[in-house]
């Protein structure tokens, strides 16, 4: 966390119209904002994914649940107002969007994995692989089990009226998710801070919210934003800040093949737009970090 020294949001002015590439894992698709102060702290300049957030209060109010935004999203299903690729309906709506009975889905996945094995030159009937299609199908369903959860179920009314108005931070939440471009993992840590406004949320719920969104196909920017907006929606705090740092296997194992790179994204909403609050958050993140 020592790399986090800069105001997270000062680098960004999201006008909601500018088209930009999301975290494309293909090196040829990287875009970078060299004016971003945080970019200087990314350990390898080939890791061109740079923190991009700062939705501001106005943007916070126009989160994924905002009606006009939703209408706009349906017109432009792939790009949200922040210029990030938009989650599919199933990602947004969770459990309601799982149409197939489990058994039928598993059979389709099994057949698809068999096809994949054949296409890479393997014999899916050899001993070592004979159960792999079913095994992989079940594993993939586990990796993406966040599609079968929704925010209300996760939080389960663990909201409490409290007069606490100081910053609450849960840091080092382990994240294991799949890059939606390559279906390979990216893993890392997420740090969540919020300042309650009369309502506190059960502490264990913050990692659970992060877990729900990370167990869907993701890009890091969207994952970071979804967690922040979800907390904003459910607890109505004065502000939320989310920082995520991760390592993308699709960069390590293919593409630019750079190991040791860290991708950092952030999303600050509400009072964390103010530099004083943001810096307090960053300083608390750095505390006890080695
Ligand atoms: Zn990827």
Image (tube, rainbow, N blue to C red):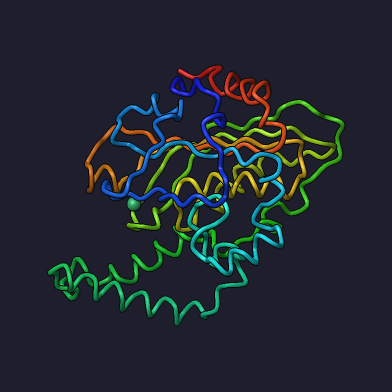
> Which residue is painted at 49% across and 39% down in the image?
174
- Residue at image location 33% in from the left, 75% down from the top: 110
Q: How many marks?
A: 0
39 sits to left or right of 266: left
Front-lying residue, 81 or 163: 81
Q: Residue at x 78, y 38 (%)?
A: 200
Residue in the foreground of this view, choosing between 76 and 197: 76
The vertical placement of 65 against 290, above or below, is: below
| Res 35 quadrant in image | top left
Q: Position of residue 140 (x, y in %)?
A: 40, 63
- Give residue 251's quadrant in the image: top left
Residue 138, x across and y down, in percent: 40, 66
- Which one is nearer the viewer's eye here, 40 or 208? 40
Image location of residue 30, percent across then percent down: 33, 45
Point out residue 132 in the picture as x, y percentages from the top left corner: 28, 67
The C terminus appears in which quarter of the rendering?
A: top left
């Amino acid at each position: 966390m020592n790399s986090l020294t800069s105001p997270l949001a000062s680098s960004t002015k999201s006008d909601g119209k500018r088209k930009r590439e999301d975290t494309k894992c293909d090196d040829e698709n990287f875009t970078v904002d060299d004016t971003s102060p945080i970019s200087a702290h990314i350990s390898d300049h080939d890791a061109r994914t740079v923190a991009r957030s700062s939705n501001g209060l106005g943007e916070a109010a126009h989160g994924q649940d905002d009606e006009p935004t939703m209408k706009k999203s349906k017109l432009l299903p792939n790009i949200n107002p922040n210029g990030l690729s938009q989650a599919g309906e199933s990602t947004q709506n969770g459990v309601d969007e799982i149409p197939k009975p489990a058994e039928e889905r598993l059979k389709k996945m099994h057949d698809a994995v068999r096809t994949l094995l054949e296409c890479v030159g393997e014999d899916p009937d050899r001993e070592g692989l004979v159960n792999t299609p079913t095994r992989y199908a079940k594993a993939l369903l586990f990796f993406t089990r966040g599609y079968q959860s929704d925010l209300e179920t996760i939080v389960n009314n663990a909201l409490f009226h409290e007069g606490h108005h100081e910053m609450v931070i849960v840091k080092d939440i382990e994240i294991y998710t799949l890059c939606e471009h390559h279906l390979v993992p990216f893993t890392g840590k997420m740090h969540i801070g919020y300042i309650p406004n009369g309502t506190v949320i059960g502490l264990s719920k913050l990692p659970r919210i992060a877990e729900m969104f990370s167990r869907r196909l993701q890009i890091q920017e969207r994952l970071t934003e979804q967690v922040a907006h979800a907390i904003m929606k459910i607890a109505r705090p004065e502000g939320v800040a989310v920082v995520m740092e991760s390592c993308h296997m699709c960069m390590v194992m293919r593409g630019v093949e750079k190991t040791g790179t860290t991708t950092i994204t952030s999303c600050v909403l509400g009072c964390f737009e103010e530099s004083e609050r943001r810096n307090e958050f960053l300083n608390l993140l750095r505390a006890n970090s080695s």
